[in-house]
Amino acid sequence: MTVLPRLAQQSLLIEVSLAPKPGLVDPFSVGAHVDMDYDLFITSIQAWSPYLKQYLMIGATSSKLTTLFATLRQVGAQGEAAMLTATHQVNTHKGANFSYAILLGALGWCLKTQTLKQICAQRFTTVFQTVKMMTAGITTADFAHVLAKSHWSYGEALYVKQGVTGIRGEAEAGYPMLQNVALPFLAQHADLPAALRYLQLMVYLMAKLEDVNLLHRGGRSGLIRVQQAAQAILDQGLTTAPSWAKALNSLDQQLIDWHLSPGGTADLLALSIFFDQVVVSPVSWDVIAKGSKHEV
């Protein structure tokens, strides 16, 4: 079971090392950010990734599904604190930590009754079903007293003003964007080189995801603007790595000018890479993309 935390950490490293990523941090650009860069992301991953094994083991050793989420959340808060300490309070992976905790916990739970081969053959259906069961009602519970608060987080503000449930709603639904959009896309494009395949998935997700980071930074109009820009790239029907690199570099500059960063897409991309790597396990490969910003 030790291979799974390693693959989880590797998926985070692969995601941040992919380039070019419009509006996002990569080895060659800070994207639309002023408070974080590639080295900070590496520091962050090193700080909280030891908790990945704990999330998996909590699921594998838990006796009750009804208490699994609460335990994962408690330990997940420790992982988040480790991340914030290492980054001097810069939020690099809060959303990713939440999702990895839930999904690795669910995976550990499922491994008590199924082999990893069986879980992969079912395209992780039981994992996503487990997530739905153990997170049922968290949105209502978390936001029950939000109106009484004097200060809202940006997630709470989006919920109150627009009814956006964000990552909580995605978890309660069993991560449908991951299960029904991202993983099928990767399966359908299995013949592509890994880096190009993941970058194409990134653009596909940017065009379809209700990215909470974009909503926070640019409002509904900013989200739509980025979705339309991503869809425009998809509509071009690009077929070569150089053409994709050119399009992504152009979109990167646009998002920098707009001060917009699709952080929700980045988290979902990392999770997609993790599950994709689990399918091809035990193949292990080095972090992608340190050649040139113009190479895909």
Image: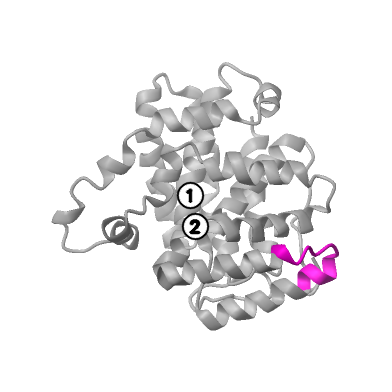
Callout 2: SS: loop
Is the C-beta separation of discs 2 and 1 under 8 Å? yes
Left or right of 62? Residue 283 is right
| Residue 178 showing in the rendered view | yes
The residues tagged by marks 2 and 1 sit, at their Cα atoms, a distance apart of 6 Å
Question: Magenta span covers which residues?
Answer: 234-245
The answer to whether residue 230 is magenta is: no
Give the image location of residue 205, x and y in percent. 60, 56
Give the image location of residue 89, x and y in percent. 40, 66
Disc number at residue 93?
2
Disc 1: which residue? 97
Q: Amino acid at mark 2?
A: His
| Residue 217 showing in the rendered view | no
The answer to whether residue 242 is magenta is: yes
Give the residue at the far front of this rendering.
Answer: 235
Left or right of 199? Residue 33 is left
Give the image location of residue 238, x and y in percent. 80, 65
Q: Amino acid at mark 1?
A: Asn
| Quadrant holding the C terminus | bottom right
165 or 120: nearer the eye? 165
Vertical side of 120 occupied by 206: above or below: below
Q: Say which residue appears at 65% left-offset and 40% top-offset.
A: 275
Left or right of 217? Residue 270 is right
Give the residue at the far bottom of this rendering.
Answer: 257
